[in-house]
Image (cartoon, rainbow, N blue to C red):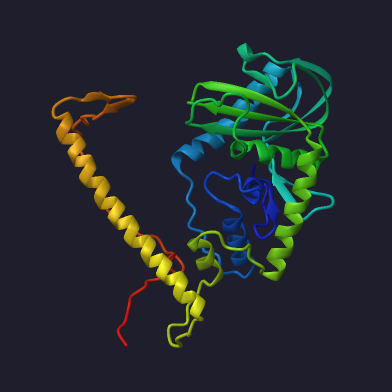
């Protein structure tokens, strides 16, 4: 996992975002960072948490244990180099790597071994490992795509590997080993999104914005000196925004009023029922609040994620 990656090119760790399947980031975030990194304007404020550092320390141990359960003997439990796709502008940093020759494995949940879509497989060739630690409870079936699945399939495509192994340690104690077979459909989709991403980085062609934050990333510096006169159709748009904000305000006030009436009706009862509705009004336990010294970290100048609207009289 140590290989030095070029952030203004696609990497296996962001492909879930390029497919809009990321948990904490999307393709807009990936492209904005890549363009900033290319131009030397990206400010990296990332700081690894203690939990993440512990996960990194555990990776070789978990990979070694997974290899033992699967009967793998030719193993790289730590990889300190990056791999590069032979045809696409795409890189990856592996957590582990192994080779297998006619290794028969079976679906065995009791041993934490899950063959995705298969009951039995015969492993051959170069096989990448992806390792994750999760505080979530295990998923029914395979893990969500953002939990290493897309990342693993990307590494498989880079290595031209027929198989890949995803290790997930859930809740610090439940170790699960997911074995995947290569998915040709994923490989075709990957080529499309990676080539599009690479072109957009080179041309600084942002994806069409879907949220205010996306527009703020595109126009990151504002000209406060010169006022722009917008077209008449923008007046209708602004009127609609203002009407929606007023409707939200009224709805929020009405919700609070009705919630108050409901609470008064329940009184001292923590649970209640109304037709098919089951109601619960919890009493939260007392707790001490830890007062921490507030620290600040440097951040680049950026546009706000909203436009302030006010009405002026002619």
Tell me the quadrant of the picture where the N terminus can be found.
top right
Q: Residue at x 73, y 50 (%)?
A: 91
Name the residue: 30% across, 84% down.
Answer: 313
Residue at the spot x=80%, y=49% of the render?
A: 85
Q: Residue 201 location in percent, x, y?
A: 68, 64
What residue lies at 77% left-to-right and 52% top-to-bottom? Answer: 192
Residue 252 visible here: yes
Q: Note whether 209 is above or below 272 in the view shown.
A: below
From the viewer's perspective, is 233 left or right of 284? right
Q: In the picture, residue 181 is in which quadrant?
A: top right
In the image, residue 172 sits, relative to residue 82, either above or below, namely above
**Residue toward you, 310 or 202:** 310
Q: Is residue 282 above or below residue 253?
A: above
Above or below: residue 203 compared with residue 276:
below
Residue closest to the eye, 149 or 280: 280
Residue 172 in picture, x, y percent from top left: 49, 25
Residue 59 at x, y = what percent?
A: 59, 32
Q: Quadrant of the C terminus?
A: bottom left
Return the residue nearer the eye: 69 or 81: 69
């Amino acid at each position: 996992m140590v290989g030095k990656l070029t952030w203004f090119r696609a990497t296996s760790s962001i492909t879930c975002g390029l497919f809009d399947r990321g948990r904490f980031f999307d393709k807009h975030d990936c492209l904005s960072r890549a363009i900033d990194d290319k131009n030397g304007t990206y400010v990296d404020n990332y700081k690894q948490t203690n939990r993440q550092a512990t996960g990194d320390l555990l990776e070789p141990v978990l990979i070694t244990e997974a290899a033992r359960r699967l009967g793998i003997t030719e193993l790289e439990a730590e990889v300190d180099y990056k791999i590069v796709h032979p045809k696409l502008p795409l890189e990856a940093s592996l957590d582990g790597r192994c080779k297998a020759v006619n290794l028969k494995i079976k679906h065995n949940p009791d041993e934490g071994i899950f063959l995705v879509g298969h009951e039995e497989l015969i492993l051959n060739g170069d096989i990448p490992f992806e390792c994750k630690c999760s505080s979530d409870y295990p998923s029914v079936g395979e893990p969500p795509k953002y939990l290493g699945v897309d990342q693993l399939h990307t590494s498989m495509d880079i290595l031209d590997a027929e198989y890949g192994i995803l290790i997930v340690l859930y809740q610090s104690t439940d170790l699960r080993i997911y074995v995947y077979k290569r998915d040709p459909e994923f490989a075709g989709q990957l080529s499309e999104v990676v080539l599009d991403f690479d072109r957009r980085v080179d041309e600084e062609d942002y994806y069409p914005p879907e949220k205010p934050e996306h527009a703020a990333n595109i126009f990151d510096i504002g000209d406060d000196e010169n006022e722009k006169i917008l077209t008449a159709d923008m007046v209708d748009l602004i009127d609609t925004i203002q009407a929606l904000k007023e409707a939200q305000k009224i709805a929020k006030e009405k919700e609070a009023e009705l919630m108050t009436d409901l609470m008064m009706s329940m009184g001292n009862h923590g649970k209640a029922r109304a037709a098919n509705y089951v109601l619960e009004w919890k009493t939260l336990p007392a707790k001490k609040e830890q007062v921490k010294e507030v620290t600040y970290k440097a951040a680049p100048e950026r546009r706000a994620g909203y436009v302030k609207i006010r009405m002026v009289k002619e």
